[in-house]
Every structure is written in C-alpha cells, then in structure tokens.
C-alpha cells in the first residue's frame, strides 16, 4: 500500500509543508564562482579559436632556474647563444638571469663564437668563490661581477675586448666549477672557497672598477704589466690590481728602475700584505672591552684595527710613498721587505711608520734623497725599527691608557688626529735621539724602554715637552752634528736623565711638581750626575723649593766649570757626588 503525505500524522507545531533553509553565499564563494564562470567562458572561446592562432612558449632550463617565454625573435637569439656554449655555461647564464637580458643579447652579437665562449667561461668561473680575504670587503658577488663585466666589455674597443676575454678565459681555465648542490660539508661547515678563483675575480674586479674616462688606457696597462709574467708573478700583480689599481700603478712606476728580483720581492710582500685585509673598518673595534654604563672606561686590544682595509692599504701606501720619495738601493729595499715579512701586523705598522717619519725627520721628503749613497739615515733608523721594544712603544703611542682585564691588555682609543700626532712625536723624539747618539745605539733603546714604563698621558705629555725643549731644526742629517748637540742641549739633558733613571715614574712625577723656572736647572743637574739621578730626586724631595734651587745651582756650577774648562770633568762629577752625599747625610739627621 502506498502511503501519502496526507496520511502521515501531523506533529503539533509543525507546518504540513516542508521548505529548504535559505542560505546567503559568502563574498569569497561568490568570487570563486565568478572566476570559475570566467574560466569556462575562456575555455569555450578557445574551443572556437583556430589552433594555428595559439601562442607558443619556449623553456630555458638552468641548474636552479627555469625561464618560460613566448616564442619570439628574442628567444631565437637566446637559443642561438646557447647553441654555441657548453651545457654548464648555458645553465649558468640562465641562472644568473643574464641570458634573457636585452643588453647581454646585444653584447653577444658583437662577439665571435670564440669570444662568446670565453665570456661564458669567465662567467662560470666567477661563480666559484675566491679564497676568503679582502674579497668579503671589496669584491662584488659573482653575479654582480658578471653583470658589471658585460657593461665594461661593451665599452671597450673590439681589440682590447678580445685581449681581455682571452686573458679572462686563461684565468678561468684553472678554476674548479662551483658545486652549488653541496653548500655544506659533512661536518656542517660551509665548503671552503677556492684560491684558484682569486686571479679571475681580481682581474675582472680591477677592470670593472676603472673609471670610464680611463677604461681603455688602464685596461691596456693591466694587460701590458701581466704580459711576460709567470703564474706566481701574475697572481701577485692581480692581487694588487684587484685591491687598489691606482696604488698598484704607482708601485710599478716607482720600482721600475730596480732589479727584477727586487721588484718581485716587493710586489710579493705587498700582495701578501693586501690579503690580510679581512675586516671592514666598521668592525675595527672588536675585540673590545665594552662599557656596561656610559661612564665606564672601555678600550680595544692593541691590534684591533690591523686587519681592516684602511689600515692594510694605508701600510701599502706608506711603502709605495717611500719608494717614490727616496732613492733606495736594491739591497736596502730587499732588506726592508725581508724584515717586514718576519713581523706581525702591529710591528709591521710600527716599522713602516718609523721609516717614514724617521726619514722625514732626518732628510725631509721634498726632494728624492739618495739613501743608496748616503746610508747614515737608514743605519740610524735601523736602531729603532729593528728593536722589538722600540716598535712596541711606537705602536702603543697610537693608543691611550692601558688596562689589564682577564689577563689581556686593553687600550683606550684616542681620536684619530691625536693618535697620529702622538705617534709622530714619539718617532721624532726617538729619531732625534738616535741621530745625536749614533755611537751609542743602546742608549736610544734604553730611552724607549723607560718611556714605555709611563702611563699613556704621562708619556705623551713628556714626549711633547722633550721635543719642544729641542731646536726646531728640520732635516737633521744636513747639519753639523757638533752644532746640533749644542742646539739640543736641553733635549739631551732630559733624555740622558730618563735613560739613567731606574725609577722613571718617580722622576717624572717629581719634575712635574717643581716650579717652572727650576725645571731646566733640574734636568741639567740630573743629566750631569748621570747614574745618581734617582739619588738626586730622593735627596731633593724633603727640601723647600729654595733649598732645592740652591742644590741644583751648586751642581750646575760644577757643570759650567767643566764647560769653561776650568775643572776636569771627572773631578767635577766626583765633587757632585760628594755634594749629594753631604745632603743625603743632612736629610738622615733630620
């Protein structure tokens, strides 16, 4: 039997008619339905379209990138380029985004097949990272280097461009292909870069960095200088060219007249030195003792900036300037290069500053002084730059107060101009003293040792005072030594006393407390009593200023008597010693 709805009992409260619930679609659903409808319309239109009118696409597959473009004259050009290259070279151009670039395609049409292959070889080699040194600071990425290289090559005449590409291909041939699939080694470390890539990176970077006005001339200078060199010589030159081309050209001009062996040694040293520039200047304060509050003292280690680009290339510039300003013999330059190779960066800096400032103090830098025939200046400077403690004093004079923290020495950082001035004055003092005491080089070394015992501010103030006490004579080597000794009498009085003192801090503190009119008398007496200088200070301490002046005048009268040849020097010194003994007994009685 068929049961109809009329036969079903009605439940109370329910309508006899059932209606579906009305639901309003969301905006998102409406949007999706609209898109579906649009696609259906487009599909229907395509069904009605002639298949011959469909747009055709072509695909370019790199190692990491896929480029899909509508078929066109441009894609025909891209295929034509790829047909002339190896599979790896073509993939690299696709991954770099170079192949589809309009400027590159126009550039490629200027090249013959060989030149195109040479460029692609260089572009592939540039993707292998160079050995990590200054590349991290001064060198663009491989991709940027390739893009800049295209622009540079496009601006060169065809002959020069051909030579550049041939050299780039030669340098690229020894570079292992970068394996981008293996960024990390089995230990989880980034895989090491390849030193074999240094030359091609240096070569391309050097040429890319040339100003447009000098592009053709300087590019040819690079090529000319590389011609005829062996592989090691070429690498050294490229290392310098890639770092600072103008400075490199200055170096090559300045050493042109030297023996080839001398040139090789200097270029080799400076190329290796340039590799030590591994930090940007903004990081030059690390490691640093940082303050926890604004008022807390802080400082850096002594060599905190030795591996920054500005310092390293500043050292190279100083070396080049020396070869420009003075005439050295081959042996003198080779000796300098050999000395520097055996020093760490801090002492290399000090060595070069001593040489530069010292020569300026002795012979000036306005005329190219012939040091090859007049060796006295360099011989004197060897007293300073060959001594470890003297170099250390020069290095520390660039810095401020020294403090020890966790077993390490930290130095307050002076402002740049003050640091340069203080270091220069330290070298001038040591150079002047060494020149005036050429027969006693050990005296200058002892002077440096004693100055090193002072606090930074005390040391710097004393050095300024001593320098101001001497004559303002420049180019000391051009003056009669006997006359210089007279001109620098007060200078020598001070340095002699400092050398003889075993308690130089007490000596300087005592002198600084003396009345100003008595200070010169004190230094004269202190110099005259020689190794009794500390006894002199000890005796003078308890007396009044008037008594101190009387004692100093008594000793200096003996000095003046010897100057007038009225008294034998040995007798005068013995009498001075007796005088000190008498006053020592007097202080003991008190």
Image (cartoon, helix red, strand yellow):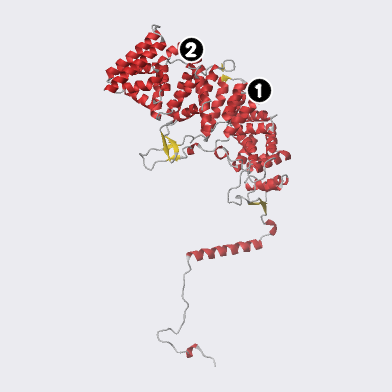
Asked if one can make out residue 139 in the rendered structure from this viewpoint, the answer is no
Viewer-proximal residue among 152 and 394 = 394
Q: Which mark is residue 11?
A: none
As helix, strand or loop, the secondary structure at mark 2 comes to helix
From the viewer's perspective, tell me whether residue 146 is left or right of residue 426.
right
Q: Quadrant of the C terminus?
A: top left
Viewer-proximal residue among 205 and 382 = 382
Image location (x, y in percent) of residue 478: 51, 13
Mark 2 sits on what residue? Answer: 481
* In the image, residue 337 above or below residue 368: below
- Mark 1 and mark 2 lie on one chain; the one further toward the N terminus is 1
As helix, strand or loop, the secondary structure at mark 1 comes to loop
Nearer the viewer's eye, disc 1 or disc 2? 2
* In the image, residue 449 above or below residue 374: below
From the viewer's perspective, tell me whether residue 348 is left or right of residue 58.
left
* In the image, residue 140 above or below residue 214: below
From the viewer's perspective, tell me whether residue 13 is left or right of residue 250.
left
In the rendered image, which quarter is residue 209 located in? top right
Mark 1 sits on what residue? Answer: 259
């Amino acid at each position: 039997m068929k049961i109809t709805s009329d036969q079903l009992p009605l439940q109370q409260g329910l309508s006899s008619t059932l209606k579906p619930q009305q639901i309003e679609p969301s905006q998102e659903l409406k949007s999706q339905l609209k898109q579906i409808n649009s696609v259906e319309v487009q599909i229907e239109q395509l069904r009605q379209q002639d298949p011959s009118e469909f747009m055709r696409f072509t695909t370019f597959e790199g190692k990491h990138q896929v480029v899909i473009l509508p078929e066109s004259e441009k894609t025909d050009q891209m295929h034509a380029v790829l047909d002339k290259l190896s599979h790896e070279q073509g993939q690299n151009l696709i991954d770099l985004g170079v192949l589809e670039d309009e400027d590159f395609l126009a550039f490629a049409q200027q090249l013959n097949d060989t030149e195109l292959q040479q460029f692609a070889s260089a572009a592939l080699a540039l993707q292998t990272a160079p050995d990590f040194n200054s590349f991290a600071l001064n060198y663009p990425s491989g991709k940027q280097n390739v893009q800049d290289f295209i622009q540079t090559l496009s601006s060169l005449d065809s002959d020069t461009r051909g030579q550049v590409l041939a050299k780039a291909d030669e340098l690229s041939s020894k570079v292992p292909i970068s394996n981008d699939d293996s960024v990390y080694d089995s230990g989880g470390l980034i895989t090491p870069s390849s030193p074999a890539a240094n030359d091609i990176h240096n070569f391309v970077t050097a040429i890319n960095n040339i100003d447009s006005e000098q592009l053709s001339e300087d590019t040819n200078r690079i090529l000319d200088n590389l011609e005829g060199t062996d592989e090691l010589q070429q690498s050294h030159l490229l290392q310098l060219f890639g770092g600072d081309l103008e400075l490199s050209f200055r170096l090559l001009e300045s050493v042109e007249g030297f023996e080839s062996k001398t040139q090789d040694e200097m270029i080799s040293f400076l190329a290796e030195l340039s590799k030590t520039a591994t930090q940007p200047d903004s990081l030059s304060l690390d490691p640093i003792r940082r303050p926890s509050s604004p008022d807390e003292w802080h400082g850096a280690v002594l060599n905190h900036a030795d591996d920054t680009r500005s310092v390293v290339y500043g050292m190279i510039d100083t070396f080049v300037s020396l070869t420009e300003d003075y005439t050295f013999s081959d042996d003198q330059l080779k000796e300098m290069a050999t000395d520097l190779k055996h020093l760490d960066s801090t002492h290399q800096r000090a060595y070069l500053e001593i040489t530069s400032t010292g020569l300026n103090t002795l012979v000036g830098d306005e005329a190219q002084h012939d040091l090859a025939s007049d060796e006295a200046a360099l011989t004197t400077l060897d007293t300073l730059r060959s001594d470890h403690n003297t170099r250390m004093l020069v290095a520390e004079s660039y810095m401020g107060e020294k403090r020890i923290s966790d077993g390490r020495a930290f130095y307050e950082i002076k402002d740049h101009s003050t640091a340069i001035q203080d270091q220069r004055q330290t070298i001038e003092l040591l150079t002047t003293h060494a020149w005036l005491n050429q027969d006693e080089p050990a005296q200058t070394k002892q002077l440096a040792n004693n100055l090193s015992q002072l606090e930074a501010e005390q040391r710097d103030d004393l050095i300024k005072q001593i320098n101001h006490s001497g004559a303002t004579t420049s180019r000391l080597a051009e003056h009669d030594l006997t006359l210089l000794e007279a001109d620098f009498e007060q200078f020598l009085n001070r340095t002699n006393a400092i050398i003889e003192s075993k308690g130089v801090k007490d000596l300087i503190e005592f002198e600084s407390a003396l009345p100003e009119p008595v200070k010169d008398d004190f230094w004269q007496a202190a110099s005259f009593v020689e190794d009794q200088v500390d006894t002199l200070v000890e005796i003078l301490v308890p007396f009044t200023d008037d008594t101190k002046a009387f004692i100093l005048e008594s000793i200096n009268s003996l000095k003046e008597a010897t100057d007038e040849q009225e008294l034998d020097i040995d007798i005068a010194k013995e009498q001075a010693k007796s005088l000190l003994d008498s006053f020592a007994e007097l202080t003991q009685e008190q």
